[in-house]
Image (cartoon, rainbow, N blue to C red):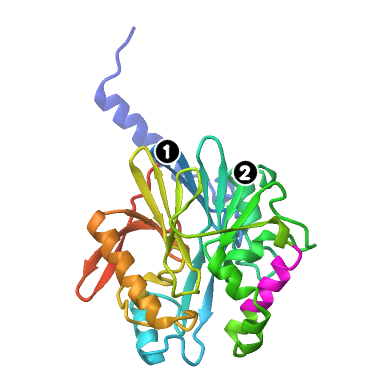
Amino acid sequence: MTGLSRRHVLNSSAAAMAASTLLPLAAIPALAAAPPSGKQAPSFYRFKLGDFEITVVSDGARAIPLPPQFVRNVSNEQVLAAAEAAYMPKGSIIAPFNPVVVNTGAKLVLIDTGFGPGLGPTVGLLPVTLAAAGFDPKSIDVVLISHMHGDHILGLKNPDGSLAFPNAEIKVPAVDWAYWMSDENMSRAPEGFQKTQFGFNRKIFTNLADRVTRYDWSKEVAPGITSVDTSGHTPGHTSFVIESASKQLYFQGDVTNVPDLFLRNPEWQVMFDSEPEKAVVTRRRVYDMASAEKMLVSGYHFPFPGLGYVEKAGTGYRLVPMAWNPVI
């Protein structure tokens, strides 16, 4: 058998390349153009926490143009400058929505439900995301509500008014239930955001009182999940410590809405807080604890998948995102 020399191979390759350049353009196959898809794929992210499997399931995100006073105690100019420094769209802030499914091995627990379909193309994506992640809504055993604002409760019902999670026990903070379901409180609420939230609660819960369990703080509200008082954002705002095999995750709801604003500037009082000064005290307490204990934090409004560690930085804090891991 005749061996091929290195020079023979190189000369043959050069000849082939030269021949290809002599072909007319029409003889060279073209790559077909593909139309842009125009949308994102359903977004979910899984990881192990001890023996539990945690799945962050995105309900979407939206850009929110700043109202006349988004933060009560600083000017909008300062807020816009901070948002721009974080590369958010000019004149807006970005708000993601990140419910979480905890698979304990015995129970499927969903924490918060997003908006539900019908409030715009970029939110209300939880049903699609759950399906993509392999979850049947009928298989959810418990729905835990951190607090009773619309972006956390509206996904409890389908657009036709039926229950989105028909077999689940629905659990809400007892303090929030007493506040938001009070007709007297609703009559005193100012027009705007607060009044709207009372309307959302009537829409979702008016015919569900017999199906809703009201939980207290410092209780195990589902296997391995303990409720924590983080009031201020709402009177009954609750965070959750999720623990398995000595591993912990702190689901912090709206202790901080936008980390680039309220982690860096924990004294800022967002317009959504029911008790803004109390919310500041809670924020400091939670992040001093999380940074000291190096606890993994899940942020409902943090950039997807909303997972990271909080460190002290100057007079505030910073978020160190958890590294994406292809292995569960």
Mark drawn on residue 135? 2
Query: Is 182 in front, or is 325?
Result: 182
Which image quarter holds the C terminus? top left
Residue type at numbered disc 1: Ile
Taking the image as shown, residue 109 lies to the left or right of residue 227, namely right
Residue type at numbered disc 2: Phe
Query: Is 250 in front, or is 41?
Result: 250
Q: Quadrant of residue 47?
A: top left
When the figure is inspected, residue 320 is found, relative to residue 70, above or below; the finding is above
Res. 308 in view: yes
When the figure is inspected, residue 188 is found, relative to residue 317, above or below; the finding is below
The answer to if 169 sits in the magenta stretch is no
> Residue 313: x, y in percent?
21, 70
Circle 2 packing at 10 Å, graded few (<14), some (14-19), many (20+), is: some
Q: Are marks 1 and 2 in contact (CB under 8 Å)?
A: no
Name the residue beneath numbered marker 1: 328
Mark drawn on residue 48? none
- Secondary structure of residue under mark 1: loop
Circle 1 packing at 10 Å, graded few (<14), some (14-19), many (20+), is: few
